[in-house]
Amino acid sequence: MSKIKGSVPIIGVGGATGSGKSSVAHSFRAYNAMIIDLDRLSHDLSRKGRRLWKAVVLNFGSGFLDQKGELQRKKLGRVVFKNWKLLFLLNRISHPIFKNQLKKIILRQPPSAIVVIDGAILFEAGLIPLVDCLIFVEAPEEQRSSRLSQKGLSPDEIRSRLKSQKFISCLRRRSHIIIENNTTPEDLQKKIDFVCQIPIEKISHFDHKTG
């Protein structure tokens, strides 16, 4: 049973930036699961005129808007990831908005659905109480840095993002399943296949680490 009354089974997939959690989350499409990517949700809620956009402008001013009034998320990120107080402020105003929107999306799903939430901020945003099963994906810092570099982040931006995840150990401790993503994509797929073979009605009672 989900922890949102009357809703569907909810699986959370978290991990440090660059760990490969999105690959694991999207593997649940084999169950016809609906994948909620928290980064994409943030992008959608940040569009001009939407709730998160309004909250950012109110708290940070209009200096992060482009000529069309859209929020420049990368510019904001470069600033907040270097300043813990500003990051805390952004989290404080954004996380309740995420949680409220997630509940709305989940409650709209049909009874046969499965929802998978993909995101690094499950702990900070107070989303763990919503999920029935928490999967944590981890990888060595060197590999995570390499993946972030491939996405176009500079060394300074990578260091800032890695340091910003101060609660990642809290997320790991609360997980039911830990997947080590430290070798090849083929090896990761084998681990994902193993997890996906666990009956969905039993997965929240499962306690296993795949190494």
Image (cartoon, rainbow, N blue to C red):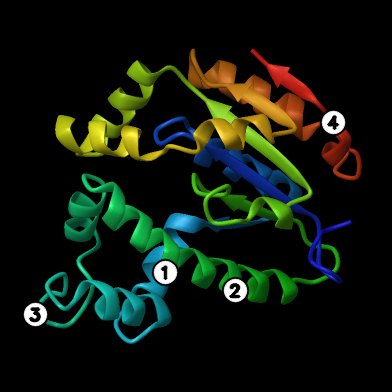
Alpha carbon distance from label 4 to label 1: 34 Å
Q: Amino acid at mark 3?
A: Gln
Q: Is residue 179 above or below residue 95?
A: above
- Quarter of the picture containing the N terminus is bottom right
Q: Which label sits on residue 100? A: 2
Q: Which label sits on residue 93? A: 1
First along the sequence among labels 2 and 3: 3
First along the sequence among labels 4 and 3: 3
User: Residue 69's image quarter?
Assistant: bottom left
The residue positioned 32% from the left and 54% from the top of the image is: 87
Give the residue number, with chain letter if any, for mark 4: 206
Q: Residues within 10 Å of mark 1 (few under 14, many from 20)?
A: some
The residue positioned 26% from the left and 47% from the top of the image is: 81
Where in the figure is residue 192, as x and y percent of width and height?
66, 28
Is 152 positioned to the left or the right of 20 in the image? left
Where in the figure is residue 174, as x and y percent of width and height?
69, 36
Query: Between 54 and 118, which is closer to the camera in this rendering?
Result: 54
Q: Residue furthest left?
A: 67
Q: Residues within 10 Å of mark 3 (few under 14, many from 20)?
A: few
Alpha carbon distance from label 4 to label 3: 50 Å
For the question of whether residue 199 can be seen, the reply is: yes
Labels 4 and 3 touching (C-beta < 8 A): no
Residue depth check, mark 2 versus mark 4: number of the one nearer the observer: 2
